[in-house]
């Protein structure tokens, strides 16, 4: 489980890593803890440090420019916070707004999270043809937003205000 956010030396989100990897980066003096879990501590024979939630690299890492976040089924579910775009219940599937049979693509703007019941009810039709309204319009998250969303909703509330999402 990736639950620690890694920031570049310039405070830009880079990636998420496991808690163990974050501790190794801190112990090797390659990163510093920007925010720690309030009640968790990592203890060893000669070490006792707070469990990092957000770390910042000590040296700037040049990253190739990523214009778009890669689309994935998991990414759509995370973007929509596992809530059905038609009824608001827990979503377990991804629905194409314009069905693939009508030329719809696997893109951020054409896919939404949906519960199995609504996905089955809509079938191979557009929401208008099925008489179903979207509760919210799909959007394309930036790569940094997609990374923050992947941390999970409960983790987002504990992050510093300056790491707020641009679109949600």
Image (cartoon, helix red, strand yellow):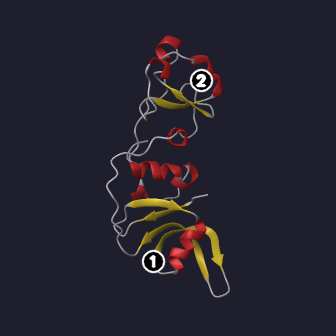
> What is the secondary structure assignment of the residue under circle 2?
helix
Q: Is residue 160 above or below residue 39?
A: above
**Residue, far bottom:** 46
Circle on res. 119: 2
Residue 74: horizontal and vertical position, in percent?
Answer: 55, 42
Q: Is residue 91 visible?
A: no
- Viewer-side residue, 142 vs 73: 73
Q: Is residue 49 above or below residue 107?
A: below
Circle on res. 61: none
Residue 139: horizontal and vertical position, in percent?
Answer: 41, 36
Neighbour tally class for label 1: few under 14, some 14-19, many 20 plus, Cα within 10 Å: some
Q: Residue at x 55, y 55 (%)?
A: 155
User: In the visual, does 62 lie left or right of 149?
Assistant: left
Residue that numbered label 1 is attached to: 30
Q: Residue at x 66, y 82 (%)?
A: 44
Sequence-first tag of 1 and 2: 1
Q: Residue at x 47, y 14 (%)?
A: 128
Q: Is residue 24 above or below residue 46?
A: above
**Residue, far right:** 45
């Amino acid at each position: 489980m990736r639950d620690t956010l890694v920031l570049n030396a310039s405070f830009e989100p880079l990636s998420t890593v496991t808690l163990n990897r974050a501790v190794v980066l801190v112990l090797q003096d390659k990163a510093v803890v920007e925010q720690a879990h309030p009640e968790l501590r990592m203890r060893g024979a000669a070490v006792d440090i707070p469990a990092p939630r957000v770390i910042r690299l000590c040296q700037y890492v040049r990253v190739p420019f990523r214009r778009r976040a890669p689309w994935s089924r998991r990414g759509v579910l995370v973007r929509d916070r596992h809530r059905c775009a038609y009824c608001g219940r827990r979503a377990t599937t991804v629905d194409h707004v314009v069905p693939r049979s009508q030329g719809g693509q696997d893109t951020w703007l054409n896919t939404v999270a949906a519960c199995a019941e609504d996905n089955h009810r809509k079938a191979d039709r557009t929401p208008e043809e099925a008489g179903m309204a979207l509760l919210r319009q799909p959007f394309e998250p930036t790569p940094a937003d997609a990374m923050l969303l992947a941390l999970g909703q409960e983790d987002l509330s504990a992050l510093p205000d300056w790491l707020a999402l641009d679109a949600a």
